[in-house]
Image (cartoon, rainbow, N blue to C red):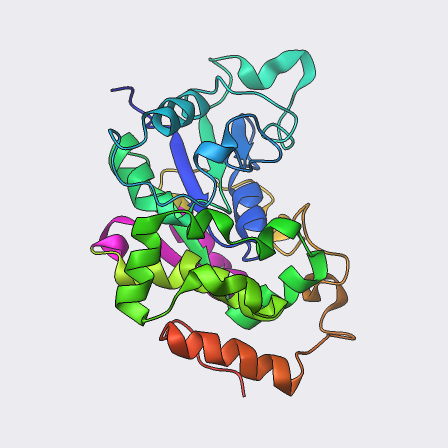
Amino acid sequence: MTRFNKHVIVVGSARSGTSWLSETLAQPYRYRMLFEPEQETRTKKGHLVCDKWLMTKSDVPKAYRYLKRVFQNRVDCNWIAQNSNRRFKRHLWPFIPKKFIIKFVRANLAAMYLTETFQIPVIHIIRNPYEVLRSQQQVKFPWLYDLSHFVNQPHLVKLIQETFHYDITQYQSLSPIEILAIRWCIENVLPIDIFTEYQSKINVIRYEDLVLNIEEFYKLCENYNLKPVENLQEFYKQPSSKTHPESTRILKNRNKKHFSENDIGKINSIFDVFNVTLYPRAL
């Protein structure tokens, strides 16, 4: 088994701060960031991992081989390498990268598999779901509203039915905001609250804690033997490359859009089904 002792994985729902965290971690010289190798529309083999509940190496040999090549820095495309120094293909030179930061937004259900199979530490970043859903509504990525990968995994459908008495196969009859709420619950409530031993093996951190206290970031770097960029104080408050132009990080809460009471009710009805306790309900 290849040892990936220069690697750290960041997972989280889209718009939860994954780009900001991974880009900040990857700022030091010769740190390499691998951007969302699981995105099925942007990579040739991302579909093997995208929205999949991966469990054992033997169950998903193709996904294992693909991920192993990703972690070995042998998979290259403009999407994965968008945050890398690609001049003369320096990002692929084996002796150049000192650390690898790999960022996923559609692999939360695979986090346990990633850390157990490849022995790579995983950071799962979560953010207030109402802020996440509001941001997801702004960007309107079509895949956010497509739960078909989840629905096409019978063992996942069964788990949700047995645990929450809810049938996700009927999601297409729901409103867009309810679909987003279901995706957030699948990506966060299931792994953090339902998967056994998840929090003992995966470091779950809150976006709000990191943003408000830079010392938490220094602790994170120390825990994973990462070197913070020298001008971290200056860089820390900057938005990521994927921040929406109407984000509160840019507008500083000016003209912030709020959910209607009807939408809040729909979101909370889904959160009640999934017994969301990670954040308090919005009223």
- The secondary structure that most of the magenta stretch takes on is helix
> Residue 181: x, y in percent?
51, 67
Tell me residue 132's x, y (percent). 57, 64
As rendered, which of 41 and 98 lies closer to the eye? 41
Write the residue at 66% across / 26% down.
78
Give the tally of numbered discs: 0
Inspect the magenta stretch and tell me whether residue 6 lies in it: no
Q: Residue at x 59, y 54 (%)?
A: 144
Task: Work out which quarter of the rendered image holds the N terminus and state it.
Answer: top left
Q: Answer above or below: position of 173 versus 87.
A: below
In magenta, the rendered stretch is: 197-220
Position of the C terminus by quadrant: bottom right
Residue 276 screen position, x and y as percent: 39, 74
Can residue 154 be seen here? The reply is yes
Confirm whether the magenta stretch covers residue 219.
yes
Considering depth in this image, is 226 or 122 the residue closer to the camera? Answer: 122
Q: Is 11 placed left or right of 197 in the picture? A: right
Q: Is residue 51 above or below residue 211?
A: above
Residue 39 as seen in the image, left or right of residue 138:
left
